[in-house]
Image: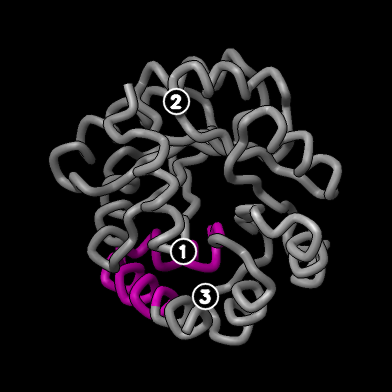
Amino acid sequence: MSKFDKIAVLKKIGDTGMVPVFYNKDLEVCKNVVKACYEGGVRAFEFTNRGDFAHEIFGELVKWADKECPELALGIGSVVDAPTAALYLQLGANFVVGPLFNPEIAPVCNRRLVPYCPGCMTVSEIGKAQELGCDLTKVFPGDVVGPNMVKGLKAPMPWSKIMVTGGVAPEAENLKAWFKAGVYCVGMGSKLFPADKVKAGDWQYVTDKCKEALGYVAAARA
């Protein structure tokens, strides 16, 4: 069961402004990455449902993070169907993210008061997701639609909370463009965790990169 209520989770995501997105089949690597991000100031983290037995890794990660990273909202990503969402809710997911919008997932998450953030690419999809209780919607892939899509959407629908994932980089100009367009937060994966740094176990690099990116987010919001 989620250890934070829906409002608290959305606030953590919004306050942090950046949600790291990561998967690895090695539990110890995952622990090190999560801890490095946490020490860098991150308070919302998305583990992705990308490999065989990912749910087993996630279950262990939740129990570990509950002690080691007590303020962290740990969510699950790459969820495309309701049974998978239900599985991860049982394992303690604080939020559920998907690359697409599946209306069947919304009531499963709503029943447990857990945020469902579906991937959308059109204004109509976002509107339908909001209608079904999705307070936060994901624009994906971000690098295909660009910041102007978010800016255009926010004009007639200013209440929209948008997370952008895909092509977001921990760079000042990139983050400034998204936040000036009006995003609530961004999701960031491989650019935060270069494969060579993960392989070398350079967790200090990850911590430093998170601090740097969060600094850019704060400057963009100023």
Name the kind of residue labelled 2 in the image: Leu
Marks 3 and 2, how far apart in space?
31 Å
- Residue 190 placement (x, y as % from top left): 54, 61
Q: What's the image's color scheme?
A: one colour
Name the kind of residue labelled 1 in the image: Gly
Dot label at residue 170:
3
x 27%, y 46%: residue: 31
| Marks 1 and 2 in Cβ contact (< 8 Å) | no
x 22%, y 30%: residue: 63
Query: In the picture, residue 112 is in which quadrant?
Result: top left
SS at badge 2:
loop
Q: Nearer the viewer, mark 1 or mark 2?
A: 2
Marks 1 and 3, how far apart in space?
12 Å
- Residue 213 placement (x, y as % from top left): 44, 76
Is 197 in the magenta?
Answer: yes
From the viewer's perspective, tell me whether residue 123 is left or right of residue 220: right
x 78%, y 41%: residue: 127
Q: Which of disc 3 and disc 1 is earlier in sequence?
A: 1
SS at badge 1:
loop
In the image, the segment drawn in magenta is 186-214
SS at badge 3:
loop
Dot label at residue 17:
1
- Residue 71 placement (x, y as % from top left): 23, 48
Pick whichever, 28 or 12, lies toward us.
12
Name the kind of residue labelled 3 in the image: Pro
Marks 1 and 2, how far apart in space?
21 Å
From the viewer's perspective, tell me whether residue 147 is left or right of residue 25: right
Dot label at residue 113:
2
Q: Which of disc 2 and disc 1 is earlier in sequence?
A: 1
